[in-house]
Image (spheres, rainbow, N blue to C red):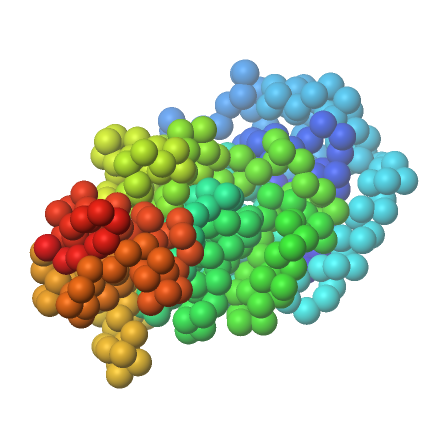
């Protein structure tokens, strides 16, 4: 870490110490950072006229730390206690014992390989993230920074996901990674885990996890192996929270703005109407990102949130091409700020290998002409059932279908319901056959 790199007259160590003050948080740090950064740009001639920063009539003559006053911090909505602590620190370097310990532990952590502190002025800090409301003043990072230069898609969804949701997520994430797209998610159990696992299974493109805790309190514990695998395969863990920040419910929703802010678009797979995944979708809308949703079963509460998004205009995802076409078009219109080589790879279709032919992918199975009567939105389970029933000359009952497919009961029932509703199979006295 370069401790002598200054933003607004504050070194990286100063910004770290500010983040340890009581009553501080990412939003208050962001307000100060934005204000001082604008003043620096003003001084260099990058900002003029209406861009002049002003806070309740307070205007610094320069962006130096020596000009930061108690009144300015209060105008930036810093609590009284926090503002006083900040001024004490700036005047005398004063920190209490707990804050000093956090500073020393953090500096030790940052001295280790592949540990990063990325202020907005850092060349690796993503431009797209700088442009959102309340952009983090800085991010902690662990791992390779390669993923920050790649086009990214956020994938979010239910923690208590179904087998259907998990399978769809695994396949879509793997296929996105195969096209050079970095999958971004939150490292939680359920859909988040499947998103990272799918990308890791492809292995050609790193995946990025935005944590809702500090990087020395990785949560959930049961995903510790997943986090290690993300790092091992060249991925990255990031957080805006101090290293030792433990899991607290109110910390997770704000990190969703980072998932969407980093991404070209956000894909929602399985979400109830009260799901936190819809927070990510709302952030994406506010940030002018694409919103994608995978349809689910009609009467499944886990899919109500996705169906709500679809009614509101989200792009329906039947296969990976639905994502690629929307993102490619958006990138061309808006001007892709990502790595050009990665973008070229992103735009190209992956050649079909013999392995792909032997084990059809989600998108190829949807386009298989032998089953052209199947709706494009059917699940992979429904497709497999249709293939089985096509081969069988006699109807098969539920137990026979379980023996043949080895599917979980829930997935089998869902697949059969999809086929029945689409008129592709017939149920006669509990035995199923192709129409």
Q: Could you say where residue 343 lies in the image, as x and y percent from the top left?
A: 30, 64
Q: Nearer the viewer, residue 234 or 23?
A: 234
Q: Nearer the viewer, residue 175 or 71?
A: 175
Residue shown at 11%/67% (left/top)?
370
Q: Could you say where residue 86 lies in the image, as x and y percent from the top left?
A: 75, 31
Question: Where does the C terminus fall, quadrant-wise?
Answer: bottom left
Q: Could you say where residue 26 lies in the image, as x and y percent from the top left?
A: 60, 36
Residue shown at 32%/62% (left/top)?
400
Q: Could you say where residue 430 lies in the image, as x and y percent from the top left?
A: 26, 49
Question: Where does the N terminus fall, quadrant-wise?
Answer: bottom right
Q: Residue 75 lies in what quarter of the image?
A: top right
Q: Residue furthest top?
A: 56
Q: Residue furthest bottom?
A: 354
Q: Is residue 104 left or right of residue 151?
A: right
Q: Is residue 116 left or right of residue 39?
A: right
Residue shown at 82%/40% (left/top)?
99
Q: Is residue 29 above or below residue 144?
A: above
Q: Is residue 341 visible?
A: yes
Number of marks in the rendered image: 0
Q: Residue 299 lies in what quarter of the image?
A: top left
Q: Is residue 139 visible?
A: no
Residue shown at 53%/35% (left/top)?
253
Q: Is residue 81 above or below residue 370?
A: above
Q: Is residue 363 above or below residue 130?
A: below
Q: Nearer the viewer, residue 27 or 399?
A: 399
Q: Nearer the viewer, residue 27 or 426?
A: 426
Q: Is residue 19 left or right of residue 378?
A: right
Q: Is residue 61 left or right of residue 20?
A: left
């Amino acid at each position: 870490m370069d401790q002598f790199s200054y933003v607004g007259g504050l070194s990286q160590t100063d910004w770290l110490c500010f983040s340890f003050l009581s009553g501080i948080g990412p939003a208050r740090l962001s307000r100060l950072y934005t204000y001082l950064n604008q003043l620096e740009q003003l001084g260099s001639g990058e900002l003029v006229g209406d861009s002049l920063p002003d806070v309740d009539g307070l205007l610094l003559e320069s962006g130096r730390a020596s000009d930061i006053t108690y009144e300015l911090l209060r105008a930036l909505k810093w609590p009284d206690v926090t503002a006083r602590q900040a001024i004490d620190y700036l005047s005398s370097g004063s920190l209490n014992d707990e804050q000093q310990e956090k500073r020393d532990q953090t500096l030790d952590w940052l001295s280790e390989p592949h540990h990063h502190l990325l202020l907005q002025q850092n060349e690796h800090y993503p431009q797209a993230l700088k442009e959102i409301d309340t952009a983090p003043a800085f991010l902690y990072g662990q791992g390779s920074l390669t993923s920050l230069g790649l086009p990214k898609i956020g994938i979010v969804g239910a923690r208590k996901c179904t087998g259907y949701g998990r399978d769809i997520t695994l396949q879509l994430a793997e296929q996105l990674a195969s096209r050079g797209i970095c999958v971004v998610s939150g490292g939680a159990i359920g859909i988040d885990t499947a998103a990272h696992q799918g990308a890791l299974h492809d292995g050609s493109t790193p995946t990025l996890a935005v944590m809702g805790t500090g990087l020395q309190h990785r949560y959930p514990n049961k995903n510790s192996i997943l986090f290690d695998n993300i790092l091992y395969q060249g991925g990255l863990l990031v957080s805006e929270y101090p290293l030792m920040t433990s899991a607290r419910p109110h910390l997770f929703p704000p990190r969703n703005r980072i998932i969407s802010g980093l991404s070209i678009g956000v894909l929602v797979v399985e979400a109830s109407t009260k799901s936190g995944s819809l927070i990510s979708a709302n952030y994406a809308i506010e940030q002018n990102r694409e919103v994608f949703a995978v349809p689910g079963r009609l009467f499944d509460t886990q899919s109500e949130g996705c169906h709500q998004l679809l009614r509101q205009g989200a792009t329906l995802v039947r296969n990976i091409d639905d994502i690629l076409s929307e993102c490619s078009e958006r990138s061309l219109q808006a001007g892709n700020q990502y790595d050009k080589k990665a973008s070229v790879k992103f735009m190209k279709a992956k050649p079909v290998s013999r392995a792909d032919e032997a084990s059809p992918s989600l998108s190829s199975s949807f386009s298989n002409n032998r089953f052209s009567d199947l709706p494009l939105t059917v699940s992979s389970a429904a497709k497999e059932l249709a293939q089985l029933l096509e081969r069988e000359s006699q109807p098969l009952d539920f137990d026979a279908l379980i023996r043949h497919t080895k599917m979980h009961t829930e997935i089998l029932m869902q697949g059969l319901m999809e086929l029945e509703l689409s008129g592709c199979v017939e149920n006669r006295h509990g035995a199923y056959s192709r129409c």
